[in-house]
Each structure stands twice: as C-alpha cells, then as structure tokens.
Amino acid sequence: MLASQMYSPTLREVPADAEVVSHQLMLRAGFIRRIGAGIYTYLPLAWRTLRKIEAIVREEMDAVGGQEILMPIVQPAEIWQETGRWNVYGEEMFRLTDRHQRHFCLAPTHEELVTTLVKADVTSYKQVPLTLYQIQNKYRDEVRPRFGLMRSREFIMKDAYSFHTDTDSLAKTYQDMYDAYSRIFTRCGLYFRPVEADSGAIGGSGSHEFMVLAQSGEAAVVHCSQCDYAANLEVAIPTAVPVNPTEPAGELEEVATPGMNTIQALVDGLQIPVIQTIKAVAYAAGETVVLVMVPGDAEVNEVHVAGLFGEVELPPASEEALHALGFAPGYMSPVGIAPSDNLVVLVDPTVMNMNDAVCGANRKDVHYRHVSPQRDFKNVRVESVRLLHETDGCPHCGGKVSIDRGIEVGQVFKLGTKYSEALGATVLDADGKSVPLIMGCYGVGVSRTMAASIEQNHDDDGIIWPAAIAPYEVVVVPANAKDEVQFAAARELYDDLSAAGVETVLDDRRERAGIKFKDADLIGYPLRVTVGKHFAEDGQVELKVRKTGVVETLPPTAVVERVRELLREL
Ligand code: ATP
Ligand code: MG
C-alpha cells in the first residue's frame, strides 16, 4: 500500500468529546469516524485490524468444533415475546415496525433466534453436542454510549451457542471455550484475566468474564494475591462478619440536620467520622420497596441486591412509594417504620455491629444519633449487601486482595435450559424421552477488543500494535522522497517485503521526514524501515521497533530476514 493513496485521514488535534485514549488515537490516526452517538465507520486501517481479530477468533472457534453461520439482525418480536425478553430489554433494544405494522428489533444478542433455528432441525440426542457461531453487528441502545468503540450502539460481536443433552457435555464445551478465549486474547496481545461473573442478565448457572486490565475499564475486578480467586466486584461478596451483641452507647436522640441529605453533608455538618454514619438506599422490586442499609463509606452491591429478587437491575424506589411507607427521602432508616408486605429492609452485618451510629429519622432535616441497629432496627433482614473493599480480604482464603479496573472483552455462560424451555427446543434422549436442550453461550466483543488493545498498547506518540493485529506490519520511509536514490532504494525494499508476504506500506508522500515519522508512530506500525541520508554514504538503512524504540542499522539485503524474525517476537 502506498501511503499517498491510503484513506487514513489523520488529525493533529484531539477531538474534545474523546475521553479515553483508544477513542482519541483511533480518531487521530484515521481509523474511525463518528456519524452519531455510538455509531462509527471503520476506515481501512481499522477494518484491517478488525478482520485480523476476526480471523484469530474464527481459527480458535473452529479449533474447538464451532461451525460458522450468519443469522439475521432484523428479528421478529414474537420470538422475543416467547422468552419474555421483549419487555426485559426495555429501552436498550432498537425496535422497528414494518409496513404491515409487525414489530421487529435489531438484535442485541441471538439466543432467541439460534434456539428457534435449532429447535426446528435438531430432534435427537444424536445431533448434539453442537456449537454454532457468527461474527456480526449487534445493536444496543446504550444509556451512555461512550469511549468510542468501547461502548457503542452498533458493535461487532462474535457470539457462539452450544447445545447439549447433559451437563457434562456442556461443562466440556464451556472449558474448551474458556481455553479458546484465553488463546484469542493472548494472540491479540492483551494482558487479561478471566474472572467469575454474574450471569443474572442472561440466566444460567455459571459465567466468567475476560477482563483486560486498564484504567479506563468500566468494570471493577477483585483478585487475590494468595489464591487463584478472581471475580467481578459485583459477585465478590465480603465474607460475612458475625453479628456480635453490642452495647448501645446511649439513648436514641434526634438531631437537627438541615439540608444534610447526603453522607458527606452529614459528616461535615455534624463533624463526625464517616464510619459512624449509615447510608440508606431504596430500590423498587415490583411493588416492593427494598431499603438497603450499608456503612456510610460503603457502596451498595446493586447487582447482588437485584439478584436476591431474581432481577438483573432494580430501579430506584419512587418518592410516592417511600412516602406511603413513612420514609423521608434523604433521611431514611428503618427506625420507627411499621412492617409492611410492601417493604423489605436489608441491613449489612457491618451495620448491625455498629453501636453509636447516625442514621435518618424519617423526617426531613432530622437524623438520630446514638443509634444501635441491634436495638433500634426492627423487622430487618441481615444480608451482605455492600461492595467488597480491599480491606475485607479474599472471600475464599482471607488473603490480601486488590481491586483493579477492567474492560470486559468476552464472557462465557452456562445457560442451562432457560431459552430451550421457553421456546420449546426439545429433543428425544437415548430412552426416547423428550428433554429440553441444555445450552451455553459465549461472546467476544470484537470491536471492543480492538479498542482495549489500544488502551493497553500505546504511548504519548500513538498506538503500538501487537504484530498479530496490526493493520500493516512495516512502514518503509524514504526520509527525503525527492532524493531519487533514497526513493528507489525504499521502493525496492517495499517490493521485496511485499513479495515476501510482509504487509508493508511505502510512505511515498512528499512530506517532511518528521511528519512521516510522527504518522508512523501515531498509526502504530510495529516496524519502521527508514532509508535516510546515510544510505548514499554507507549503503545502510535503519530498522526501528515501535514498541522498544530500538534502532538497528543494516544493509537492505538483510531487511526481509530481520523483519520476519522481529515480527515473530512482537
Ligand atoms: P457490558 O456489561 O460491558 O455492557 P455485556 O455484559 O452486556 O457488556 P455481553 O452481552 O456479555 O455484554 O456481550 C458480549 C461482549 O460484547 C462483551 O463481553 C463485550 O466485549 C461486547 N459488548 C457488549 N456491549 C458492547 C457495547 N455497547 N459496545 C461494544 N462492545 C460491547
Ligand atoms: Mg457480559
């Protein structure tokens, strides 16, 4: 490819709306362009990298027995209504209506469609195990599309689905997929960690997420330094502290707290340590109000709380519902609240062990002090409901844990029979009995993986592609394109490298050398060969490794060999 003809419009300025480095660099280096919130065109460089990631994914899926298909993106509402997810997906689903007023969606995922597909043709246990996969656009109307390709509304996913009649077979495919995912992300040059994950959203009995560790990650990952425990913070439940009898520190007393409707305002206003405060957060589980009490410096584990009610997510309780039960938002606690069928109060065990705390008095601008939850909280359920903190230690071994940010690039699930039962996907087993298919599903965010790779592989000058997914492997730069000797030597090197199967760009633009070097660093070619002013004197060219900055000089005849050697290592 000649740089003069390549459609990779670079930008000198960082666009203001691009918050994370992968987004900034993909815009600046001419990889992507935005057409609407979370909707992008992949320009040639991005598309080459994406196709390389896809090729790696295909190879690894085929290696574990996957068969590639391509399912429709536009899907009829009926199959989604049968599993109940037409409603569950809510506003995240892009919906459309055809000319006959029939309802459709743009698929956010394909469990419904693949189960409907398989149900028609797979009728006997002899036809399974079966693993089907595809690589295709998915559509999710995310509340907050952001970070470029990391959280977009149209994105490329590899999704695979497996079908079984026994759980051992599912366990084997699950493990094969887990191993294949580890190979995929390793081959993409990523530093990642598989972690235990919540499977609430999709249903099922077991799940792992593959997390790329990076500051910009939207997920939090806990891992232990002493055992192999690693989990999404959402499923890391702090080891339950026993609730010990505590002596109340004094009589319950009202204190005026005008406008102090947040923990911070309370701490500042009363001049008390935050560990003396109790935080109340209220959710709605259908008609039921769920009041959650955690220490003032802790956060509610919302995924875990929702899971206790068989839900994926609980919306905040409405003000009307709270008032009806006697609560004053901003000043809530279970103290003095009458029991109701419409109320569940969940109290973290660490709160139950406090004995001189401050919590809301259920009247605006008033709190209680000297609160002893064991004495003062009636009709409550003690439940570990806060997010784990580093000081809690490992839920498995008590060892030291650390919490890092992670980007979820893939997830594997043991689904069980949720979709096959809802859609009537049954087969006859060896005894001639009709049984629902047991399923697994396995997703890789292909476009997110490209972004995650940049998050982990870049410096101040630009992207540093791992060779396996670089759009091109080498750029050849004649420092002075007007110098005919230099240009001819560069052209020859370019031809030799291309003939040897190395994916090469010749920067034939009549630009200053400095600009070409800047662009080469920005785009992130793993290797750069420069034919410079020394060439005329000593016949040597320069070979620079983008990742290490190491430069070697060598004669042009040695370049192909050395490039091949280096590419194997990068
Ligand atoms: P998240 O929790 O980040 O919203 P998810 O758990 O809903 O993701 P899955 O349904 O597990 O996502 O989809 C499989 C993979 O698709 C994810 O692991 C992720 O890599 C990718 N993915 C999901 N949503 C998006 C998105 N909005 N933009 C880009 N990639 C995405
Ligand atoms: Mg997921």
Image: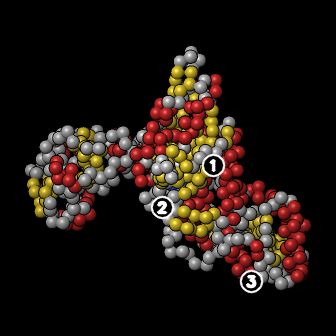
Mark 2 lies on residue: 145
Q: Is residue 365 above or below residue 196?
A: below
Q: Residues within 10 Å of mark 1 (few under 14, many from 20)?
A: many
Report the mark closest to the observer, 2 or 3.
Answer: 2
Q: Please state, as top left, top right, bottom left or bottom right, where the C terminus lies in the image.
A: bottom right
Q: Quadrant of residue 241?
A: top left
Tag count in the figure?
3
Amino acid at the residue labelled 1? Ile
Query: Where residue 521 sits in the image (x, y, percent)?
Result: 68, 71
Which residue is depicted at the point 61% across and 78% down? Answer: 12
Tag 2 and tag 3, C-beta contact below 8 Å = no
- Labels 2 and 3: the sequence-earlier one: 2
Distance between the Cα atoms at labels 3 and 1?
A: 41 Å
Residue on which the image places disc 3: 512
Whether ligand 1 has any atom under 8 Å from the Cβ at mark 2 is answered as yes
Residue on which disc 1 sits: 135
One can see residue 495 in this view: yes
The answer to whether 273 is drawn above or below residue 292 in the figure is below
Determine whether the beta carbon of the residue marked 1 sits less than 8 angstroms from the nearest atom of ligand 1: no
Image location (x, y in percent) of residue 140? 49, 54
Q: Using the rendered view, name the quadrant where residue 34 is placed.
A: bottom right
Badge 3 density bin: few <14, some 14–19, many ≥20, Cα 10 Å:
few
Q: Which mark is residue 210?
A: none
Res. 461 image quadrant: bottom right
Q: Residue at x 76, y 73 (%)?
A: 5
Residue located farthest toward the top when viewing the structure as drawn: 431
Left or right of 457 in this view: 236: left
